[in-house]
Amino acid sequence: MNTKERELLEFDSKHLWHPYTSIETPNPTYLVQSANGVRIRLQDGRELIDGMASWWSVIHGYNHPELNAAIRNQTSKCAHVMFGGLTHSPAIELAKKLLRVAPGDLNRLFYADSGSVAVEVAMKMAIQYYHAKNRTGKNRFLTVRSGYHGDTFHGMSVCDPVTGMHNIYKGVLPEYYFAEKIRSPFHGDWDPDDINSLQALLGKNHQQICAVILEPIVQGAGGMRFYHPEYLRITRKLCDDYDVLLILDEIATGFGRSGELFGCNHAAVTPDIMCLGKALTGGYMTLSAVLATENVGRVISDGDPGVFMHGPTFMGNPLACAVAAGSIDLLLSSDWKRNIQRIESKLISGLAPCKDLTGVVDVRILGAIGVVELKNPVELASIQRLFVDKGVWVRPFGCLVYIMPPYIITDEDLDILTRAICQVVEKVL
Ligand SMILES: Cc1ncc(COP(=O)(O)O)c(C=O)c1O
């Protein structure tokens, strides 16, 4: 490492706060020089095959010529303009594309800044929906254990109360209803008793509940669990029966990751409100979108106060919308479904050896997501170093070693990635 690099890293460790870190014992951070395709190049010349797609987002790989061009072209026209009272073709063209592929009759779209803010917006929509109907007591939420919906206050309030941050923020976070963990796995049999907890909570409290919020099929950062589509189908019906909205958080699952374009497509279920983020811009910029039915939009607008009360400064940023439109075009013009099936089969065969290791509780794969669940939590800094030494970028958390690579990853790189996981997991166990 040369002096310049050392100086940069020293400044970083003295002054920058990375996600979920302490300033007393900062985890090692790796200085990135550039990233291209599925490879992240470190300043010291090492190259890492990316297993994380930068937290689900970089689906087409880094430094993609078409996405670069989309941003460049838009920069020379208009990098940003306020969305209040003004509009522009990147926002309109992106909305056309999203509404065309969105499930069911989602027909109204609100742009927001990040996944967490999209969840805030969706939850505000649900509260305003019943407020507009003069049912102001209907302002609570119901969700299920092991979920994750972001780090802002309302997002946190519907994250799993144990793995989430409910303890620290007790008395400040709203306390909502949590159904028990879903036990029926995606690939297994449906246990009809699985819905009992959610059904009972809805039956008892529907007068107070405005919406059920769920991650469809894949629960991400709350446990990397894949659940049975029947849970979603029955939840949809119960929401209709009890006059409760269904919010589906597709921030991680959206754009093909689980093998369907949206997680809810596995169950042929349509939400009333849907959140998109992460892969929306191909991981180039932060942008999210909240889609709602015409009914939700009309009720909110027809009742008091007659407007939807949200309007971020960078709403509908033209650069982000332009690159998002480019990303969707890239995805839909490819044989993405077949490609995800290819990645899925490689993950199944590549991670299979982990099943035999003592200390591995489960190995599960869905679409382009591979998870190795361990009995005990890993020590992040040391396991991270082992992965980097093997030339791959994998960032486990807790008991979970998981990957969701860019969709452009080749079979050869998948072999390297999965072999590294098997070897590192064996070593740490
Ligand atoms: C399902 C889900 N919802 C919401 C979020 C929050 O998104 P962001 O980190 O962009 O705020 C995440 C992020 O991991 C997520 O996986």
Image (spheres, grey):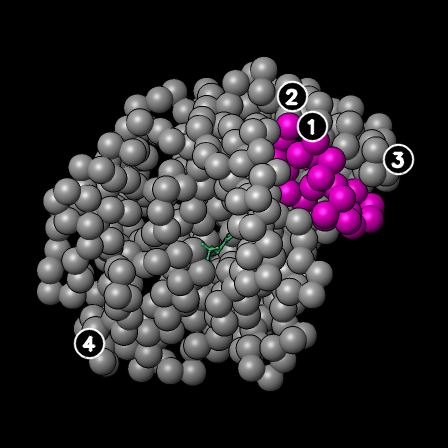
Residue 78 position (above or below residue 81)? above
Disc marking residue 358:
3
As measured in the structure, the alpha-carbon distance from the residue carrying label 2 to the one carrying label 3 is 22 Å
Q: Quadrant of the N terminus?
A: top right
**Does 168 sit left or right of 243 as displayed?**
right
As measured in the structure, the alpha-carbon distance from the residue carrying label 2 to the one carrying label 1 is 9 Å
Depth check: 131 or 201 in front? Answer: 131
Quarter occupied by residue 294: bottom left
Mark 4, residue position: 306
As measured in the structure, the alpha-carbon distance from the residue carrying label 3 to the one carrying label 4 is 59 Å
Tell me residue 67's x, y (percent).
Answer: 30, 33
Is 393 inside the magenta-drawn segment? yes
**Does 324 sit left or right of 161 as displayed?**
left
The earlier-in-sequence mark between 2 and 4 is 4
Residue 176 position (above or below residue 349)? below
Describe the element under mark 2 as helix, strand or loop.
Answer: helix
Instruction: Please rate how many residues cluster around mark 2, counting C-alpha atoms within 10 Å: few if below 14, some from 14 to 19, many from 20.
Output: some
Mark 1, residue position: 390
Are the two marked residues, 1 and 3, in contact with CB atoms closer than 8 angstroms?
no
Residue depicted at x 54% and y 78%? 174
Inspect the image, locate mark 1, and give the three-letter code of the amino acid beneath it: Lys
Residue depicted at x 39% and y 56%? 114
Label 2 vs label 1, nearer the camera? 1
Tell me residue 85's x, y (percent).
Answer: 11, 65
